[in-house]
Amino acid sequence: MCHYANEIVDVFIEEITFRNFRNYELLELRFSPNMNIIIGGNAQGKTNILEGIYFLSTAKSHRTSIDNELIQNGKEWFYLKGCVLTKDSSIVVEIANSNVEKKKIKINGKVQDKISSVIGKINTVMFSPEDLALVKGTPSERRRFLDILISRIDRVHLYNIQEYNSALKQRNELLRKIREKRKLKQDFAPYSDTLDSWNSLLVRYGTEIVQKRVSIIPELSELVKEKHGQLTLSKENIKLEYQSQLTKPNNVGDQIKDIFQKSLDKNVDIDIRFGTTTIGPHRDDLIITVDDMDIRKFGSQGQQRTAVLSLKLATIDLMNQRLGEYPIILLDDVASELDEKRVSLLFDLINKIPAQTFLTTTDFHNSDMKIWLSDRKKSDLNIFIVENGCVRKENAIYKDNT
């Protein structure tokens, strides 16, 4: 158990090993359980360090959906290893990926059958320039945000998502087969029973998914409203609304299930025509409004970024409330994307959270860094300098700056 300012950090990543990951052929780092600042110019490898930590947390990159893009140029595989300490135990997570084999995961030396087994072992919340897609991007970005959050506090939700996506894929393939049979005027009646089976699975798992998403919105909304008020000095009012064809006010599980089943039956001809399932939780969205205005369509970029920050800050508090511990916080060059006032408010809020924190920046000697360094002991802080894929610890900078 380690101390953060006058607080206690219950979970932190102690060390990490990179092999052939992005621009790091071999890199081993030990971190402070409190604050870690990573300094370097653009395209030097700062973000790659945070990406590696995030990958150990989710088995996915926050920048690409193609794992092989993470392999260093000219290599055929990458390997990551992270050692995490908690107040009660230690966890070692290892992930390997190659051009010719599927991703492999070990937890405390034991090979895992499912990639999803890594979820919840190292909880992180990432702040990055790519986060703007959470507001400006497609509904899938917002669904993914909700599902990652819920999965970290309820592993059953992750299972339901996986089963639903599997059934959805099979149903869509069957719809396209039926469409081809229709075009050729061939008998497709034998597919009817199979279609009913996939419908049944979609309804079963889809109902659970919608219920979980709907149930978390009130709690998340209150936290988002609180954080947004702190970031805007209460000048704006933010609201979240889960939008679904399957939900109505006061709907319960059986009602959602009934609506879903009837909708699938009603839309079957449309689904066959398009070769895809046109209704279900995979079509839902999270609507974000500020002063009753849909910020995806009408909000300024400043409003959109503030909304994203509010969502991420609310996620940190919600995970602590549900899990009893704060996640590791990853801040990737956030100062470059915000005006000075928002940076100051954000840093002030995060500086109060008793969690291990990582921050990348191109400039250590700026006014924003003073917020991080105020009232902080040298032992609370590790500083790393990144140049051309080489990393060195440089806490002397901190000494010179005080």
Image (tube, helix red, strand yellow):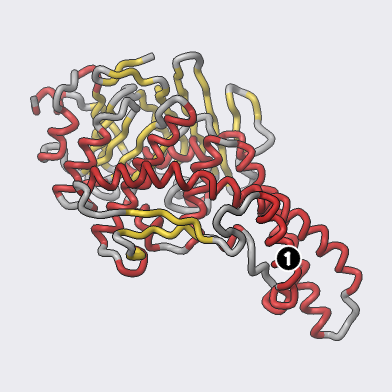
The residue that mark 1 highlights is 262
Residue 318 to residue 399: above or below = below
User: Is residue 161 at all visible to an observer of this figure?
Assistant: no
User: What residue lies at 66% left-to-right and 49% top-to-bottom?
Assistant: 253
User: What residue lies at 31% left-to-right and 34% top-to-bottom?
Assistant: 358
Residue 322 is situated, as x and y percent measured from the top left of the image, at 48, 31
Residue 69 is situated, as x and y percent measured from the top left of the image, at 48, 52
Q: Nearer the viewer, residue 18 or 201?
A: 201
Q: Nearer the viewer, residue 294 or 98?
A: 294
Residue 296 sits in quarter: bottom left
Q: Nearer the viewer, residue 147 or 237?
A: 237
Looking at numbered disc 1 in the image, what kind of residue is underneath it?
A: Lys
Residue 96 to residue 188: above or below = above
Which image quadrant: the C terminus?
A: top left
Residue 177 sits in quarter: bottom right
Residue 194 sits in quarter: bottom right
Which image quadrant: the N terminus?
A: top left
227 sits to left or right of 240? left
Q: Please tell me whether mark 1 sits on a helix, a strand or a loop.
A: helix
Say how many tags the image has: 1
Farthest-out residue, front: 250
Residue 357 is situated, as x and y percent measured from the top left of the image, at 32, 31
260 sits to left or right of 393? right
Residue 271 to residue 323: above or below = below
Q: Residues within 10 Å of mark 1 (few under 14, many from 20)?
A: few
User: What residue lies at 39% left-to-right and 27% top-to-bottom?
Assistant: 28
Residue 382 is situated, as x and y percent measured from the top left of the image, at 26, 25
User: What residue lies at 19% left-to-right and 42% top-to-bottom?
Assistant: 345
User: Is residue 232 at all visible to an observer of this figure?
Assistant: yes
